Image: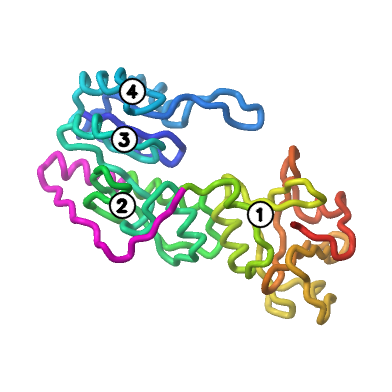
Amino acid sequence: MRLVFAGTPEPAVPSLRALLETPRHEVVAVVTRPDRPAGRGRAVRPSPVRALADEAGIEVLAPERPRDAAFVERLSEIAPDCCPVVAYGALLPPSVLDIPKHGWVNLHFSVLPAWRGAAPVQHALLAGDDVTGASVFQIERGMDTGPVFGTLTELVEPTDTSGDLLGRLSLAGAALLVAVLDAIADGRAQPVAQSTDGVSLAPKFTVADARIDWTAPAARVDRLVRAATPAPGAWTTFREHRVKVGPVRPVRPGSPGAPAALDALGERRLEPGELAVLGTHGPVAVGTGSVPVLLGEVRPEGKAAMAADAWARGARPGAQERFQ
């Protein structure tokens, strides 16, 4: 089939690469979000999908809005058989949904109808899900409500970040997407309507959502940090300046694997956000609503990430000083 692929960030790249390599389909154009400033220097950079498309010599369409008349006209001229989508980042209007013969099919990183929306992996981690996965479904006017062609499942490991999980799902999902497109081309595809049970929503995960609430239980703090890694990054404030932290590890004093220095706290419980430096070169503990967590790295505002003990030697947090 003649395909127009739509996608923007790094997790979409394995799918585009897989479609470029399969002999059964031809990617005739790519749709992606316009180039935006990125990184600490805020230099304008192409999206990862655009970079791969440019390398492959494929036409790139980057409308500000998918309803723009020029984009709709060009897509109609290309007349694709099908448009696969992976993390494109914009809603598709009816004016473009009806153009391809076999419509638009989306690789979504959850087992639908769970976690419909922009941030399914982050919300799966926040919820403490043991299993997640990916689905390929037919795009219709509702938000991720279309019938499903196929799914896969993936175990969530105890230390998985959203970056870890997305990395695995993007690779496995690319193979699923190719298989679904093969089935559509052969007339074998049989999409199944989504269940009305088990629907959950995964709205965009923002910087505000990534602020750590130290009054929450340690398990919740850990899940938030992992969900926010690598982006937008879990954060808190120290002496009225923002710092990013991660990873963290919940520990119970006296439990296997807990630093012996943690026992020195005795019966004194760390208050939520309270810092305790456990020795000159020892770990840094932070109080939560339950047991403490040990800090892995700290990234002060405008600086590079550093090990928590190195940060503590420079910052020298005082007795009962806290993250806020």
Please determine whether, in this image, residue 202 is positioned above or below residue 251: above
Nearest the eye: 26 or 42: 42
Of callouts 2 and 3, which one flags the residue occurring earlier in the amino acid sequence?
3
Residue stretch rendered in magenta on the structure: 175-203
Q: Are marks 3 and 4 in contact (CB under 8 Å)?
A: no
Which residue has dot 2 on it? 135
**SS at badge 2:** strand
Residue 133's disc number: none
For the residues marked 1 and 3, what is the alpha-carbon distance in whole angstroms? 36 Å
Q: Residue at x 41, y 37 (%)?
A: 89
Q: Amino acid at mark 1?
A: Gly
Q: Amino acid at mark 3?
A: Leu
Q: Residues within 10 Å of mark 1 (few under 14, many from 20)?
A: many
Q: Residue at x 59, y 66 (%)?
A: 220
Which residue has dot 1 on it? 246
Which residue has dot 4 on it? 68
Q: Residues within 10 Å of mark 4 (few under 14, many from 20)?
A: few
**SS at badge 3:** loop
Color encoding of the figure = rainbow
Q: Is residue 158 left or right of residue 56?
A: right
Which residue has dot 3 on it? 92
Whether residue 57 is in magenta: the answer is no
Of callouts 4 and 1, which one flags the residue occurring earlier in the amino acid sequence?
4
